[in-house]
Image (cartoon, grey):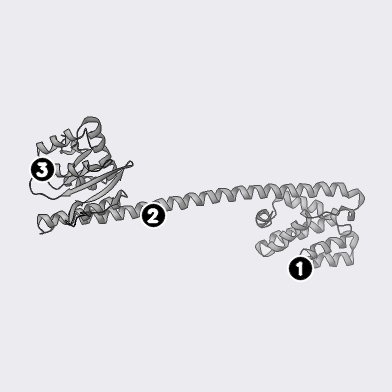
Amino acid sequence: MTNAFADITFHYPPELFNLLVDVVPLLNRSKQDVLVFFRGAGVSDTMTADIAAQLRSAPKNVNKYQMVRTVLECLNAKGESALRERREVLRRVVDFANFDSCWPDDRLKAKGLVASIREVVNQKDAFTRMNNAREEERQARLAEAQRIATEKHERASRIENAKQGLYALFGTSATAQERGKMLETALNNLFQAYGILVHKAFHLVGNAGEGIVEQIDGVIELSGALYFVEMKWYRNPVAKPEISEHLVRLMSRAEVRGIFISASDYTEPAIHTVREFLQHKVLVLSTLQEIVYLLEQQDDLAEFFTKKVQAAQIHKNPYFRPHCNQGQGAS
């Protein structure tokens, strides 16, 4: 009942106040016993001094019920400063067990009143626990909302930084080959910001000492499938030979699919080659222009490539452009 006591004793509500006024005189046989009861609860002598003086001068004019009401009203009026005393008075009543000290005719009534007070306290305790549970649930929701908001903000910040890194490529004076390497880094950072990157650029070395035999620009995962990502910064449209090189790389892996991202467009023979290749492997084509548009629209990168993969699988269209309505057209 600790929670109930911490709340209900801050100020006795009317129902509890009246029950206490009725029961305390029954629990204490004499008027002097009533004073002892309150002193035992920590009520100061100054608060009961007037009552004690009346008992000495004219005891017959003092009523036990009026004594209890006077003291309880004083305790309520003192507010927080008398919290400890109010709590102790209530505790002594709730814990009262030996009704043999009551007058015989008062025992049953006293037991009934103590039971009623216990019920009020228990109800208050249940209400307090329910409110505490609601508050804990509310705090948990707030904490979860704050966590989600923080993660969303951090993700947006990572995406913005990656986006600026990508945009910086368009103003650099680097060579096409240098831009190609910079593009790998920028796009891998972008994939990482969206949480879909599996592995950044890496290379494979031959077992016979022939050096680097294969360069992988990046690996991502979409819907449980792995995709090798090829990134190129060519001045002219990507032609069939460049596409075929990536297709060979995919054919040497059993379950790996492919994504080709180019700063330029694709020739029709290159697109046709990929379309025919779909019966063996999934490969989708994208341009840097599409990704820039996606970033400007604050769309989701994983969803963007998922739409491309679905178009390739269902419609045999490896160069589907989800933003075709914005003037990019679908192949």
The image shows residue 222 at horizontal and vertical percentages of 30, 43
Inspect this view and state whether residue 282 appears: yes
Name the mark on residue 149: none
Q: Residues within 10 Å of mark 1 (few under 14, many from 20)?
A: few
First in sequence, mark 2 or 1: give its number: 1
> Would residue 52 be found to the left or right of residue 329 on screen?
right
- Judging by the rendered image, the residue that carries numbered circle 2 is 150
Kind of residue indicated by mark 1:
Ser
For this orientation, the residue located farthest to the front is 208
Q: Nearer the viewer, mark 3 or mark 1?
A: 3
Q: Position of residue 71 (x, y in %)?
A: 77, 60
Residue displayed at 77% across by 47% down: 116
Dot 2 crowding, Cα within 10 Å, few <14, some 14–19, many 20+: few
Q: Which comes sooner in the sequence, label 3 or label 1? A: 1
Residue 328 percent across, percent down from the top left:
15, 39
Mark in the foreground, 3 or 2: 3
**Image point (85%, 47%), residue name:** 109
Query: Any mark on residue 241, and which?
Result: 3
Between 292 and 41, the residue placed more toward the observer is 292
Depth check, front residue: 293 or 286: 286
Marks 3 and 1, how far apart in space?
Answer: 99 Å
> What secondary structure is marked by label 2?
helix
Q: Which residue is mark 1?
A: 44
